Amino acid sequence: MSFFDTVGKFAVGSRLRLLTEKITEDATQIYNMYGIDMNPKWFPVFYVLSRGEAMTITAIAKEIGHSHPSVSKIISEMVDKGLVKEKKDKTDGRRNMVSLSAKGKEITGKIEEQYTDVRNAIEAISANTRHDLWNAIAEWEFLLEQKSLLRWVQEQKKERESRKVKIVAYQPAYQQAFKDLNVEWISAYFKMEEADYKALDHPQEYILDNGGHILVALYNDMPMGVCALIKMKDPEYDYELAKMAVSPAAQGKSIGWLLGNAILEKARSLGAKKVYLESNTVLKPAINLYHKLGFEKVVGRPTPYERCNIQMERVL
Amino acid sequence: MSFFDTVGKFAVGSRLRLLTEKITEDATQIYNMYGIDMNPKWFPVFYVLSRGEAMTITAIAKEIGHSHPSVSKIISEMVDKGLVKEKKDKTDGRRNMVSLSAKGKEITGKIEEQYTDVRNAIEAISANTRHDLWNAIAEWEFLLEQKSLLRWVQEQKKERESRKVKIVAYQPAYQQAFKDLNVEWISAYFKMEEADYKALDHPQEYILDNGGHILVALYNDMPMGVCALIKMKDPEYDYELAKMAVSPAAQGKSIGWLLGNAILEKARSLGAKKVYLESNTVLKPAINLYHKLGFEKVVGRPTPYERCNIQMERVL
DNA sequence: TATATTTACGTAACCAGTTACATAATTAAT
DNA sequence: ATTAATTATGTAACTGGTTACGTAAATATA
């Protein structure tokens, strides 16, 4: 079974399953050794009932981490063996109050020695290991409780993909991409306006030559995102963030976030104190991104764009 | 699910099962995230086949630690999906040579990124733990490979029970037990002889007064084992170990071993250099015990007992 | 008070593995 | 050259869990 050595941690799941099986394997024989007529799978149920109080099926299930049908089945097997007894709750007709029978209670006495021997055996095994399985399990349970494995993997994927993204300065070769990416979303949600055509057809003239900047996000050396920083003639703002567009084909690679940060960094390096932008609240993901980038809503400024219904600023 | 906190390590098995489940749970979604149409349970099979060589069902099963029917089922599912192809071995008609189809090979390329992301995710989780789950599993696998959990528990049981055994010096009150325990095995395997009756009916006179000693093993304060050390008039041997008997009702508590060691210790404290004994090879467990106690076979000595067919000595 | 929602629980169907068993092919031993 | 033992595999039945679903009782709400 060299499998795990070569496949590595990708297969923790499989490996855990095999270990679980190996540990569980001997359980029946261990019960036999102590002369206790009990199916190992009954144990968690037996254990919680051995505290003496009658419990409902669901309460047991919750406590031992099984589904309720599982407990339901276990209980009916235990009833057949005469280990537990059922009783309908008088005040709540749905409840099936389960408790140990006399025969079941008898076992609680006999089983004590088994508990201590098994616990000691496990301690003895642990004493022979350098890594503590019990605590490791507890830690994993806790971490996966906070964030599922799926989420952990998602984060890795995003990070890896974002590493493939390169942010570079605008070059004439990117003019077409700069236009296309913007036309895509503008015409999908609104209507292209005169000012759009000017900036997108002639970025050199209308943006760069006026002291503005454009950054391009490359994914596999293809331009998949663009963003402009336009010099403003305004006593309050130095630059406007505009014409940000990311290809829908390159979603989930944090391109917007990387571009946004890069453009703010650029503004900072140019000595800007505040960056301004205009947008529309129908563009939920965009607004969301702006918030994440630190932009906050402002009011009462004139704008040449019809589609603008929200204005934001970011203090650097 | 406070269960595990109170029951403690007795339930490692259950706890492992739940963790395994939790980890496995997200697997399907992770495959989806990468657009790979594969059932997670196929993965180990897929992985070993992705090395390119055609393999038999049993070879795969052995490598991934499953039973062969499990692999057989997985393969037929994968064949249905067109991921693998089967081919009868020409030189051995029993063999079903399985290998990845073109479609299967295609996945090997796509899945690479998933591998690294999942591995990195697990590394990231591990980086947040103080105890290393992966290595802990490996250590447990190794230890349980050497000795099953059943055996570990058996040892604990034996040790606990042997701690309940007290070895005490003979007193007249134990004469009946001394006789009964010996009569039990002697008459079961052989016939009581004259010398037996003398020693068992009058231990004071025939053993103790002649410079011998008797030790009694108490379990719950009941005499469950006896053993005599008889002074010999012999140039070679100082004492003979004889009349050792342990109640069949007290098996598995190491009473024989404890008695044997105690009696050898006694001999040592009396300045003996060699202890002698006579037995019969039909008494396999007894001979076994003598070996464990360090006795070795000797030949060519006269004996008053008909039933003796083996003689042993222990150099102190 | 009538109605909608929630809760408790049993049953059925499924799932991913297992063991047990049957069969065919190969290999070893007389 | 037989015969016995071993090996490779598939099928069936079992196991210990699950989810899905239905029903009845209790609780919340309009």
Image (cartoon, coloured by chain):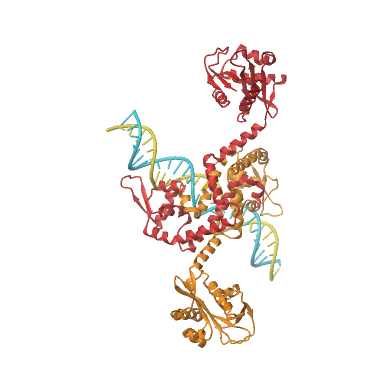
Chain colours: A red, B orange, C yellow, D cyan
**Is the C terminus of chain B in the top left, top right, bottom left or bottom right quadrant?**
bottom right
Q: Position of residue B293 (x, y in %)?
A: 59, 74
In the rendered image of this protein, does residue A155 appear above or below residue A201? below
Q: Is residue B248 visible?
A: yes
In the rendered image of this protein, does residue A154 appear above or below residue B285? above
Between residues B148 and A239, which one lies in front from this camera angle?
A239
Q: Is residue B86 visible?
A: no
Between residues B234 and B24, which one lies in front from this camera angle?
B234
Between residues B79 and B205, which one lies in front from this camera angle?
B205
How many marks can you see? 0
In the rendered image of this protein, does residue B249 appear above or below residue B74? below
Q: Position of residue A141 (x, y in %)?
A: 53, 45
Q: Position of residue A11 (x, y in %)?
A: 61, 46
Between residues A277 and A202, which one lies in front from this camera angle?
A277
Q: Position of residue D12 (x, y in %)?
A: 53, 53
Identified at 54% across, 64% down, the residue is B155
A188 sits left or right of B8 in the view: right
